[in-house]
Amino acid sequence: MRRLLLAALLSLAPLAATAAESGIELTAQIKAPLADVWEAWTTNEGISGFFAPEARVEARPGGPFEIYMNPYAAAGLKGADDMRVLAVEPQKLLSFTWNAPPHLPQARQQRTVVILRFAAEADGTRLSLSHLGWGSDGEWPKARAYFEKAWPNVLANLQKRFETGKPYDWTEWRAQLQRYQAAEAAKQAEAGKTQP
């Protein structure tokens, strides 16, 4: 019986090895109390302090986790539109769905998962980020490459927010976005005039 059980377990080992997924895994030390770092990720004001100019976040299962990098864009193109909180364990765990940026429309139609783990330490908070659920074909490699660069920047902005004691000032970013949106609207208006 033991040999049969051992043989069965050994036959499953290759399946377990292939089932393991390679995600984006990052850890950051934040020089701030755990409660403050938690609030930075779970409130609209907290998100606008380091991540994006606007957000709609409700830290409850099924609640929105929408991060608007471009609040002036059309609905569905603002950033992390229509994302949802999956799980919450206050000051320990936050997970949510995530999408690709608008310039990757094929990958954007699908969702990945981000898991944040928070731990208090003597000099602040350790934050671990896991981004999972990557496909391998089409635009998936580009989406993953994008976030391999983007997430370290987000975590650096979070660290800076607490090191300086000041939330990020989005004034210039907003001005650039407004100029961009105005130029795009002008292009569309001009294209409309030239069509019969």
Image (spheres, grey):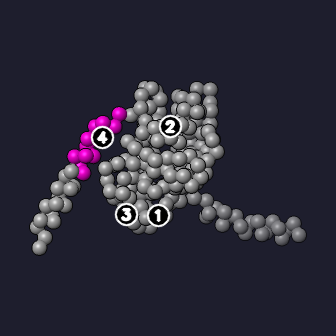
Decide whether residue 178 is among the magenta residues: yes
Instruction: Decide: is 167 above or below 92.
Output: above
Instruction: Depth check: give the residue in front, 191 or 10.
Output: 191
In three-dimensional space, the C-alpha distance between marks 4 and 3, rounded to whole angstroms, equals 23 Å
Q: Earlier in the sequence, mark 4 or mark 2?
A: 2
Which segment did they paint magenta? 169-181
Asked if disc 1 and disc 3 are in contact, CB closer than 8 Å, the reply is no
Please give the residue where the numbered disc 1 appears in the rendered image.
110
Tell me which secondary structure the magenta stretch mostly adopts: helix
Q: Is residue 146 above or below residue 42?
A: below
Q: Quadrant of the N terminus?
A: bottom right
**Nearest to N terminus: mark 4 or mark 1:** 1
Of marks 1 and 2, which one's residue comes earlier in the chain?
2
Q: CA distance from mark 3 to mark 2?
A: 29 Å
Instruction: Check whether the beta carbons of the residues at disc 1 and disc 2 lie within 8 A of each other.
Output: no
Question: In whole angstroms, how far apart are the C-alphas of marks 4 and 2?
Answer: 20 Å
Q: What is the C-alpha distance between the residues marked 4 and 1?
A: 28 Å
Label 3, on which residue? 105
Residue 129, horizontal then vertical, whole percent = 54, 45
